[in-house]
C-alpha cells in the first residue's frame, strides 16, 4: 500500500483514507476534545500524507506513519490555537488600554474645558470679589488672612466667597 501511494496511486490513497480516517478522527477527538479540531487535523493529516508521500518509509507500517503525522499536526494546530488565544488576549488588553487612554484624554479635555470656563467666569467677577476668591481658593489663604490683607471684615470675606461660588456654580453644572 505504501509503495502504491508513493507512486501516486490515488485509488490506493482513497482506500487508505477509508481505512484510517474514522480511527484517526476518534483518536484525535480523544486527544483534542474538539470535534472541529479532530476533523481539521484528520483532513490535514491526509493532505500531508499525500503531499509528502515520497518520504514515506516502506519499513514502517502505514498506520504508524499516519498516526505520527496526525500527532505532529495536532501539536502544531494546538500551538497555533494557543497563539491565536494569546494574540486575542493581547488585542483585548490593547483595546482596554486604548479605551482607558481615550477616556483619560476625554477626562483631561473636560477638565481643561471646565478650567477655561471657570477662569473666564472668575475674570467676570467684580474686582474685590475676584481677589477674595483667588486668595481663598488659589492661594489657600484663610478668611482671617484675607481680611487682614485687604482690610475688610471676615464677614465681608465670607459674603464675597459665598457670592462668587453662587456665580460660578452654573458654570460648573453646565460643564
Image: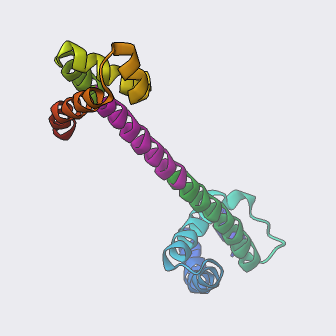
- Color encoding of the figure: rainbow
Residue 116, above or below 102: above
* Residue 102 pos. (x, y %): 37, 38
Q: Quadrant of residue 154?
A: top left
Where does the C terminus fall, quadrant-wise?
Answer: top left
Name which residue lies at 27% across and 31% down.
155
* Residue 165 pos. (x, y %): 23, 34
131 with respect to 92 (left or right): left
- Nearer to the camera, 175 or 158: 158
Name which residue lies at 28% across and 32% down.
158
Count of numbered labels shown in the rendering:
0
159 with respect to 3 (left or right): left
Q: Quadrant of residue 70?
A: bottom right
48 with respect to 147 (left or right): right
* Residue 5 pos. (x, y %): 64, 68
Q: Is residue 90 magenta?
A: yes
- Nearer to the camera, 142 or 109: 142
Q: Is residue 17 magenta?
A: no
Residue 148, above or below 142: above
* Residue 76 pos. (x, y %): 65, 60
Where does the N terminus fall, quadrant-wise?
Answer: bottom right
Name which residue lies at 22% across and 36% down.
172
Residue 124, above or below 104: above
Residue at the outermost right position: 59
74 with respect to 94 (left or right): right
- Nearer to the camera, 62 or 136: 136
Decide whether the magenta segment is chiefly helix, strand or loop. helix
Name which residue lies at 63% across and 85% down.
30
Which contiguous range is marked in magenta?
89-112
Amino acid at each position: 500500500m505504501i509503495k502504491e501511494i508513493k507512486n501516486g496511486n490515488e485509488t490506493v490513497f482513497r482506500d487508505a483514507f477509508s481505512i484510517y480516517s474514522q480511527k484517526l478522527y476518534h483518536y484525535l477527538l480523544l486527544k483534542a476534545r474538539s470535534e472541529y479540531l479532530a476533523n481539521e487535523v484528520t483532513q490535514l493529516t491526509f493532505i500531508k500524507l499525500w503531499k509528502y508521500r515520497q518520504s514515506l518509509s516502506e519499513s514502517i507500517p502505514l498506520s504508524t506513519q499516519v498516526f505520527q503525522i496526525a500527532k505532529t499536526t495536532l501539536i502544531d494546530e494546538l500551538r497555533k490555537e494557543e497563539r491565536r488565544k494569546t494574540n486575542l488576549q493581547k488585542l483585548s488588553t490593547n483595546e482596554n488600554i486604548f479605551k482607558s487612554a481615550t477616556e483619560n484624554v476625554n477626562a483631561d479635555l473636560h477638565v481643561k474645558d471646565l478650567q477655561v470656563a471657570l477662569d473666564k467666569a472668575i475674570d467676570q467677577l467684580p474686582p474685590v470679589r475676584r481677589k477674595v476668591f483667588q486668595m481663598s481658593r488659589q492661594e489657600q489663604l484663610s478668611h482671617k488672612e484675607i481680611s487682614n490683607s485687604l482690610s475688610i471684615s471676615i464677614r465681608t470675606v465670607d459674603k464675597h466667597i459665598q457670592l462668587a461660588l453662587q456665580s460660578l456654580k452654573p458654570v460648573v453644572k453646565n460643564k
